[in-house]
Each structure stands twice: as structure tokens, then as C-alpha cells.
Image: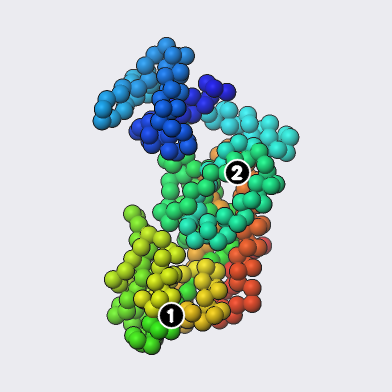
Amino acid sequence: MALLENIRTYKRVVELGGLSAAGRDLRLSPAVVSHRIQQLESHLGVRLLHRTTRQLQPTEHGLAFYEACHDVIHAVDRAESIAAEAGSNPQGSLKVTAPLGFGRRVLGPLVPEFQSRYPKIDMRLRLSERVLDLLEEAVDVAVRMAVLTDSSLIARKIADCPRMLVAAPSYLEAHGKPSTPDDLLAHRCLLLRYPGSAQFRWTLAAPDGPVSLSVNGPLDADDGDVLTEWALRGQGIVLKPIWEIASHLRTGELQPILLDFPPEPLTLAVIYPHRRFLSARVRAFADFMVDEGAKAIAARLDGLELGPVVRPGKPP
């Protein structure tokens, strides 16, 4: 087991380019990471890494060994999956990424129930509005709200995820209520920005086809909850998933606008890479989210009149 952990550690050191970065990813101190690499080098009898004050690079032997690591780890994961399936007892570490708002409101509260069902699975949760590359970041599974297009990944639908443009009554009183999509160009729009984000373009349905607008405003953030807080304080118009702002719609703190021009809907889905042998822990989490995640979203919308948009629900 120690050898396997050393191999896993070495693989992440090479992928992330440093001991400290690998340590953060694996929840280990740099000293422990360094010790594991030294143990591995001693076991193999070769130097795997060139170390300088500024960078760390694999040696020729180290690069060849890194390429072989993929096969070793895949074989072990496959064996663990087969054994776990046979015993109906998923186990091991599961790294999951999800958007901040979903993680805080839905996934976080569900994790204890998942862990009670599968006590031998260690959950490693990474919340970020940024879309992480599952392979590059060594993430097992993601929950995403998106227009799903990447055929290299398996996507299992949790629920439809319609969105709505909303603003506080104080903002609408001060700035007027937009009546057409083009009116948004003259308004303060609150935008979700992060590296690679396309949220500064809002696509709305219209009688003659979708309208894509490059909106702007004086405030943006990389955390959707900050945008909601600004909207509640009358700072502008925000585009949000309806389930995320349902409580504010019920109280009237946020009011819908342009209901005749609904934003492009998203799909809430659990996503993981194509693999011939899917680990039992990934399958267990995906099954859990398709069931319990859909229930949690439906509960947040219970009793809310959504007007012309489609209510999200558990897929058939």
C-alpha cells in the first residue's frame, strides 16, 4: 500500500509541477510528499526528478515511469472497483467538484447522507464557479449546470435548470423595468466572471429566434452568491437559476423581468469521464445525485409559481 501511495503522489507531483502543489491537492505537507518521492526513488534505484530552486522536472527515467503510472493506477482502480462491486461496498477517496451555489445549498447538505450510506468513501469536495478539467485536476466526478456539449464525458441528468433575470424592487424603481432584451444594454448587469467565463453574454429566447447580448455593468464577481447579494441591495440585474433564488422570489425581494424572453435553459447533471471500468464509488455517487439531487431541487421550488418557464424536476 505504501508503494502505491508513493506512486500516486509522484504522479500528482509531475502533473502539478511541484511538491507544494501536489501536497495541497493530496492534503499532505510538502515534507511528506518529498519523503514519499525519496522512498519511491530508493525503491526503484533511480532518480525520478530534477530539483532546482525554481522548478521540478522529471528525469528521463522519471518521465518513462510517469507514463507507466497511469496503467498501474488504472489497474488498481479497476481491481478495487471489481472487488467493491462484488461486495456491494464502495470505498476509497472520491474527489467531486461542483459550483459554489449548488455546493452550499444542495450538495453540502446531502454529503452527510451519502457518507452514512457509504461510510468507506472519503469525500473530497472542491467548490468553484470555474469549470475544472476532470482529467487534468484528477477529479472523479463533477456536478455542473451547463448546456451539455462535451461528448468526451458521460453526463447523467439530475434536473432541468431554467434561469430567470431578476432585480430588486428598489433597482427597478430607480432605473425602470426593461421591456425588451435590447433594453438590458442600458442597465447595470451583474456578471459572473472568472477565467474562461462566458457569462458576460446573455442569450434570451425571442419570437424570431435567440438573442445574444453582450451585457455589462460596473460590478462583477467570481462567486454567484455575491451577485445575488448585490441584486438584493438594488445594484443591478442578475441572471440566476430559479432554484437558487426561489426564497427571494417568494418574499418579493427579487422580481422577475422579461418573462416573455426567458434565458437559455441549462441542465443540471452529474458528469464523469468515459471509462471501461467505472469505479463503484463514482457509480454510487452518480446514482445518489440523480435521485437525491433532483428531490432537493424540487423541494426548493415547491409551491413557487414559475410562470412561462418549465419547472425543473426529476428526469424520467
In the image, farthest residue toward the top = 45
If the image is split into quadrants, where does the N terminus sit? Answer: top right
Q: Residue at x 31, y 22 (%)?
A: 50
Asked which secondary structure carries label 2, the reply is helix
Of residues 127 and 292, the one drawn nearer to the viewer in this rendering: 127
* Whether residue 55 is visible: yes
Kindly identify which numbered label has been placed on residue 282.
2
Q: Residue at x 43, y 22 (%)?
A: 35
If the image is split into quadrants, where does the C terminus sit? Answer: bottom right
Specify the color scheme.
rainbow
Q: Position of residue 140 (x, y in %)?
A: 53, 42
Amino acid type for the residue under numbered disc 2: Val
In the picture, measured across the screen, residue 159 lies left or right of residue 178, that is right
Classify 10 Å Cα crowding around label 2: few (below 14), some (14-19), many (20 and above): many
* Whether residue 151 is visible: no
Q: Residue at x 37, y 59 (%)?
A: 222
Of residues 92 and 259, the one drawn nearer to the viewer in this rendering: 92
Asked which secondary structure carries label 1, the reply is loop
Above or below for 56 versus 130: above
Tell me, yes or no, whether the two marked residues, 2 and 1, touch with CB atoms within 8 Å. Answer: no
In the picture, measured across the screen, residue 149 lies left or right of residue 61, that is right
In the picture, measured across the screen, residue 45 lies left or right of residue 298, that is left
Considering only order in the chain, which callout, 1 or 2, is on the residue closer to the N terminus? Answer: 1
Amino acid type for the residue under numbered disc 1: Ala
Q: Position of residue 166 (x, y in %)?
A: 44, 77
